[in-house]
Image (cartoon, helix red, strand yellow):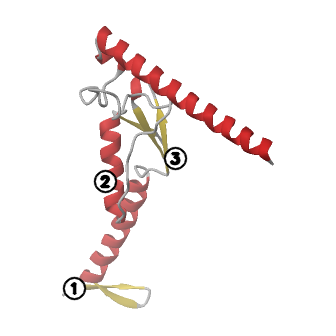
Amino acid sequence: MSAEKHNDEYISDVRKRINELCEENELQGLLESRHRSRSLTVGQTSGGVVEFGMRNEYSHLYYLVNPVEGVELLGQIASAIGVEIAIRPRDDFASWRSWDAQLPASIHWMGAAPWQLDEDERKKLSEAKSKKISDKLLEESDKTENNTDEDDKL
């Protein structure tokens, strides 16, 4: 085994190689940090597409997913951190797609974009939604009247 003198010590060839590898690893770590995302933002683009933006010191990356892929990502994240999540569509007008399972014969509409429905199906969907809204308004009106009647009794 050969050795060379360094700062009044002898350093073996193995030790020199170890030092070189440590320096290479340090450099590789610095280079890799250029490709590591520092932040993640989630937004929505047109047509129901979800956009993930990843930023680091040197660049920005964007990843676009459709709603189904978004739900799959939720499942993968939950699995990775060891939790279970319950997923159900929101029951409001902010949802881009129709997920209403209570609509008559709507199973074939489930998750369809409005432009994927023919005119007759869009009409049926619109009528069913309007009826649902009317029923909800009537229900709220009845609650308000009942509360007013009870207040009058006091």
Left or right? Give the position of 119 relative to 44.
left
Which residue, as the protein is rendered here, is positioned at the far left? 1
Confirm or deny contact between disc 1 and disc 3 (CB under 8 A).
Answer: no
Q: Residues within 10 Å of mark 2 (few under 14, many from 20)?
A: few
The residue carrying mark 3 is 57
- Asked whether, in this view, residue 59 is left or right of residue 24, the answer is right
Residue 40 vertical position relative to residue 83 in the rendered view, above or below: above
| Image coordinates for residue 64, horizontal then vertical, percent | 37, 34
How far, Cα to Cα, is label 3 from label 2?
27 Å
Select label 1 or label 3 by which is in front. Answer: 3
Which residue shows up at 33% across the image and 47% down it?
A: 73
Q: Helix, strand, or loop for circle 2?
A: helix
- Of marks 3 and 2, the one in the foreground: 2
- The amino acid type of the residue labelled 3 equals Glu
Tell me, for residue 76, which label it has, or none.
Answer: 2
Looking at the image, is mark 1 or mark 2 nearer the viewer?
A: 2
10 Å neighbourhood of mark 1: few (<14), some, or many (≥20)? few
- Residue 105 on image: x %, y %: 26, 26
The structure residue drawn at horizontal position 30% and vertical position 27%, both measured from the top left corner, is: 104
The amino acid beneath tag 2 is: Gln
Farthest-out residue, front: 153
Q: Going from the N terminus, do you reach mark 3 or mark 2 first?
A: 3
Determine whether 87 is above or below 139 in the image.
below
